Amino acid sequence: MSTKAEPKMYRLDVVKWLLVIAILAVGVVGNSMYSAQPLLFRVLALLALGVVALLIVLQTAKGSSLWRLLQESVVEVRKVVWPTPQETNQTTLLVVVVVVVMALILWGLDTVFGFFAAKIIG
């Protein structure tokens, strides 16, 4: 008995990507050709073509790895400990205070150096 999982074979990936490109091209050309039609129908058609293209992309190796990455990202976001509103306000206030203090320090240095430069230059 083998404990290794066999990797899923993705066949005809190039053909699938070409099909996706063709579907998207049909959407773009069709949208311009049927510009006299109501916008709602064109948007629905583009959404339908986009869903079909997305389903085809998910059947490729790159699409499958992207979907797996998105699922793992959702799991990681759930693990994040988000700050409370009070912590957020305190941190924001601290950042604003530090920025103002640094701006005053830089303004003071600029004024002093400008004064000395004006004395040296003339």
Image: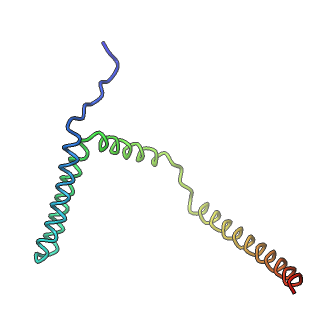
Q: Position of residue 56 (x, y in %)?
A: 20, 47
Left or right? Give the position of 117 relative to 79. right
Residue shown at 74%/70% (left/top)?
Answer: 102
Q: Residue furthest top?
A: 1
Q: Examine the image and state in which quarter residue 83 appears.
A: bottom right
Label count reads 0
Residue at 34% from the left image edge and 18% from the top image edge: 3
Residue 56 lies, with reference to residue 24, above or below; the image says above
Q: Is residue 9 above or below residue 35?
A: above
Q: Is residue 80 left or right of residue 59?
A: right
Q: Position of residue 104 (x, y in %)?
A: 76, 75
Task: Compare residues 24 and 102 and report the one nearer the observer.
Answer: 24
Q: Of residues 78 and 59, which is closer to you in this image?
A: 59
Q: Quadrant of the N terminus?
A: top left
Q: Which one is nearer the viewer's eye here, 103 or 97? A: 103
Residue 105 lies in what quarter of the image? Answer: bottom right
Q: Quadrant of the C terminus?
A: bottom right
Q: Examine the image and state in which quarter residue 30 appears.
A: bottom left
User: In the image, is residue 120 above or below residue 8?
Assistant: below
